[in-house]
Image (cartoon, rainbow, N blue to C red):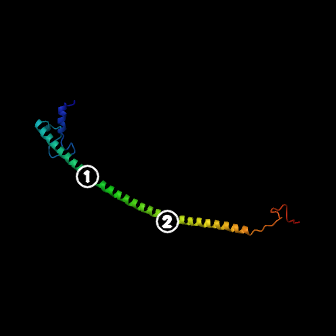
Amino acid sequence: MVPPKSQRQHEFFKTNKREKGRPDHGGGGSAISPSHHSEVGSDSDSTQILGETVEDLSLTAKRLADMLSTLRTSLQLDFRKISEEIRKELGTRTSTLEEKMDELCENNNKMREKLNKMEADYQQLQEKMADIEDRSRCNNIRVRNVPEKVQGQIFHFT
């Protein structure tokens, strides 16, 4: 049968250190032992256990806070290292890209100069060729009464 609610609450405080995984400091048997059923002993034991539990909880909270602080510091250092490595890598890559871009710009400028020179040379050659063609026409001889197109075969090979 289940004990009444008020009795169940008292049983919570009756558990000893050994039952909660703590070493026993000589306080006596289990939580259900007859020595713990008296009202006076029960209150002092429960107060003592409650005090120890609060103390353990505060120590645990302090340890957790220390662990959290250590973890936070460790993560901050890791983030700093990683961000510094990324910065260095990006700086290196950016420098490399800038150097390549400068080289490509120089090559582009050289090619543009060559193209401009070739276009100028081409224009000069076009003008020269037109001049030569015009001069060659001046020296043409006109022959009259000779057709420009020949009809039939001129040579007979038999």
- At 25% from the left and 52% from the top, the residue drawn is 69
- At 10% from the left and 37% from the top, the residue drawn is 40
Residue 154, position as x, y percentages in the image: 85, 64
Q: Which residue is mark 1?
A: 69
Alpha carbon separation for disc pair 1 and 2? 55 Å
SS at mark 1 in the image? helix
Residue 92, position as x, y percentages in the image: 41, 62
- At 60% from the left and 67% from the top, the residue drawn is 121
Most foreground residue, 103 or 115: 115
Say few, some or many: other residues with alpha carbon within 10 Å of mark 2 (under 14 / 14 to 19 / 20 or more). Answer: few
SS at mark 2 in the image? helix
Q: Is residue 48 above or below residue 8?
A: below
Pick whichever of labels 1 and 2 is earlier in the sequence. Answer: 1
Residue 4, position as x, y percentages in the image: 19, 30
Most foreground residue, 42 or 65: 65
Q: Which residue is mark 2?
A: 106
Q: Is residue 14 above or below residue 4?
A: below
**Residue lying furthest left in this view?**
40
The image quarter in which residue 41 lies: top left
Most foreground residue, 134 or 17: 134
In which quadrant will I find the C terminus? bottom right
Residue 83 is left or right of residue 23, and the answer is right
Residue 46 is left or right of residue 91, and the answer is left
Under mark 1, the amino acid is Ser
Quick check: marks 1 and 2 in contact, CB under 8 Å?
no
Residue 42 is left or right of residue 98, and the answer is left
Residue 118 is left or right of residue 13, and the answer is right
**Residue 132 visible to an observer of this rendering:** yes
Residue 89, position as x, y percentages in the image: 39, 60
